[in-house]
């Protein structure tokens, strides 16, 4: 998920106002009646759960089925698409008291974000100790949103062309390189239109929220219990705005900024700033463990090691597959999750010491995952481009990001190339919904945020909290993992369980101390042992 919020460090940037774009989408009244009709049909039909499409990968007890939704809610009797849904029933077993039977509280529906991520395997999480109490009380339900995986999948280009390497990923690209990437963005936008046709405009966040209400009805739930992570918090907030009376409980984990003015161009600018800070955190951790990795005993020295590796990979890609772009992508993942820090630091260290294998294993494009990766990117692009106006003049993108790259070079231009097709998008754009609920309209909701999250910076959680009346924000201080529900922080998990199992929230904002930073590991993946002297 590349949507984000502008950190104060970028406040001095003068960003040009977005160019006007047609509203697109459908009238709210027509779409609203279409949702009501589709939900009534789904409630009557239900979901015929059975074996999952890839049963060999499914855990024992996980079932799958489909729910039918209109492609276009303004025409609910027109073309229909099927969403694939997964479920593991509530176990009713208290993990702390085997003699106690836990009453079922309904279905907990989850979306992992993206846009473009599949939630189909979410029910497997009930096996983890941190989730067993929740899995005892709830049916755990995941699904592929429209366009994703087995739910009317989108494609914008041949997957064989999508996954490729090595790539350069310059932090300060030349004018010729920019022209090349502009041409590629135009071609990608054309490919989305050619391969999807008129249906392309219907893959957007408002329809994701409407689909969620149809899924609620199909599950037989009068009111929805939902957990969204990252981008999932955005269309969860749209759902809360559109259907507040249909909400039972909602968890927003790693909340993105729902301010219409931020969707999505400015959010992506802000995310690039936040990743620069998290990249600094990662380098500081590597420097603390210089005795293990030998990459430098200060963040600046670690940066020089990284730049040296980039230069070497530009001259000769590792394994013929990993160039500077693949290295940046692997280290970007460490900006999302700090449990990736040891493996990424070890791969960079080994490469600079003459062994490229760990880096190739982490960063080389996976041909076997090409179809899934291309599909995820197609959905990401379609949803974000359809959701809102974007600048249509390349000069705006160039000026804003050239300025930004001076202070945040690590991710800025790669973020541009991921989103640039939106400048040339062939489908009508929507005006983002003003996410907002008044006092008493919405049941109390829970917002979870890590203070140094780069993919969904903290200001987004603050904005979500301001806009959803009655919400409570729980912050993991001085931590940056993207998504903290059910993770290693017992304090966060305590608030999550109290809310989902008892409907209990803190009276006001709450804070948790950070979970411990990861320990460095040796080449075998074991905790590194330091010599004592």
Image (tube, grey):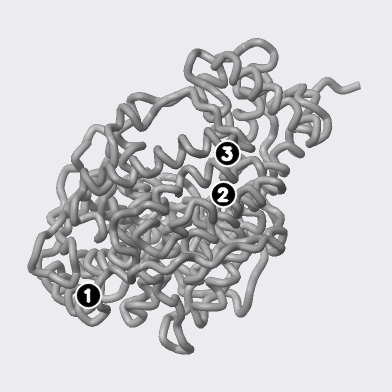
At x 78%, y 33%, the residue is 287
Mark 2 or 1, which is nearer the eye? 2
Relative to 292, say whether 424 is above or below. below
Q: Crowding near pointer 2: few (<14 within 10 Å), some, many (20+)?
A: some
What SS does tag 1 mark? helix
Residue 195 shown left or right of residue 513 in the figure:
left
Which of the two residues, 353 or 530, is positioned nearer the viewer here? 353
Which of the two residues, 439 or 371, is positioned nearer the viewer here? 371
Which of the marked residues, 1 or 3, is nearer the chain's N terminus?
A: 1
Which of the marked residues, 2 or 1, is nearer the chain's N terminus?
A: 1
At x 48%, y 47%, the residue is 129
Which of the two residues, 91 or 492, is positioned nearer the viewer here? 492
Q: CA distance from mark 2 to mark 1?
A: 37 Å
Q: CA distance from mark 1 to mark 3?
A: 39 Å
Relative to 95, say whether 37 is above or below. below
Q: Which residue is mark 3?
A: 332
Where is residue 453? Give x, y as percent.
Answer: 61, 53
The image quadrant that residue 37 belongs to is bottom left
The image quadrant that residue 226 belongs to is bottom left
At x 76%, y 28%, the residue is 304
Q: Which residue is mark 2?
A: 398
Q: Is residue 408 visible?
A: yes
Q: Which residue is mark 1?
A: 31
């Amino acid at each position: 998920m590349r949507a984000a919020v502008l950190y104060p460090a970028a406040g001095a940037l003068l960003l040009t106002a977005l160019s006007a774009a047609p509203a697109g989408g459908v009238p709210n009244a027509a779409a609203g009646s279409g949702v009501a009709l589709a939900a009534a049909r789904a409630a009557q039909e239900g979901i015929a759960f059975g074996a999952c499409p890839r049963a060999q990968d499914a855990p024992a007890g996980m079932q799958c089925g489909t729910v039918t939704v209109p492609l276009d809610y303004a025409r609910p009797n027109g073309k229909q698409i099927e969403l694939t849904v997964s479920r593991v029933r509530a176990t009713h077993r208290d993990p702390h008291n085997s003699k106690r039977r836990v009453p079922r509280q309904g279905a907990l529906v989850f979306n992992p974000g993206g846009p473009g991520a599949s939630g189909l395997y979410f029910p497997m999480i009930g096996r983890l100790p941190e989730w067993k109490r929740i899995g005892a009380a709830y049916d755990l339900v995941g699904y592929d949103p429209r366009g994703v995986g087995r739910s009317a999948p989108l494609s914008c280009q041949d997957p064989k062309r999508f996954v490729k390497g090595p790539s350069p990923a310059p932090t300060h690209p030349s004018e010729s390189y920019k022209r090349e990437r502009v041409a590629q963005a135009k071609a990608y936008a054309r490919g989305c239109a050619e391969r999807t046709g008129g249906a392309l405009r219907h893959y957007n966040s408002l329809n994701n929220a409407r689909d969620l209400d149809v899924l609620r009805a199909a599950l037989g739930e009068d009111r929805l219990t939902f957990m969204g992570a990252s981008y999932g918090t955005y269309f969860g907030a749209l759902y809360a705005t559109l259907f507040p009376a249909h909400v039972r409980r909602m968890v927003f984990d790693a909340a993105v900024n729902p301010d219409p003015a931020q969707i999505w161009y400015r959010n992506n600018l802000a995310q690039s700033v936040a990743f620069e800070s998290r990249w600094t955190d990662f380098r500081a951790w590597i420097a603390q463990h210089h005795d293990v990795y030998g990459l430098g005993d200060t963040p600046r020295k670690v940066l020089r090691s990284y730049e040296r590796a980039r230069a070497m990979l530009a001259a000769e890609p590792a394994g013929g597959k990993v160039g500077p772009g693949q290295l940046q992508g692997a280290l970007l993942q460490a900006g999302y999750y700090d449990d990736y820090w040891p493996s990424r630091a070890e791969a960079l260290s080994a490469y600079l010491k003459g062994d490229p294998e760990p880096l190739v294993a982490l960063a080389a494009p996976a041909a076997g995952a090409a179809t899934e990766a291309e599909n995820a990117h197609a959905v990401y692009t379609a949803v974000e481009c359809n959701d809102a106006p974007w600048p249509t003049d390349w000069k705006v993108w160039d000026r804003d990001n050239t300025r930004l790259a001076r202070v945040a070079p690590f991710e800025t231009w790669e973020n541009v190339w991921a989103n640039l097709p939106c400048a040339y998008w062939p489908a009508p754009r929507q005006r983002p919904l003003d996410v907002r609920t008044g006092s008493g309209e919405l049941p109390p909701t829970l917002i979870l945020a890590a203070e140094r999250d780069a993919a969904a910076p903290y200001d987004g959680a603050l904005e979500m909290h301001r806009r959803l009346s009655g919400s409570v924000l729980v912050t993991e201080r001085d931590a940056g993992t993207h998504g903290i529900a059910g993770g290693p922080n017992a304090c966060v998990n305590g608030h999550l369980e109290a809310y989902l199992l008892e409907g209990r929230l803190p009276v006001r904002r709450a804070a948790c101390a950070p979970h411990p930073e990861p320990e460095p590991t040796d080449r075998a993946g074991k905790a590194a042992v330091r010599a004592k002297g």
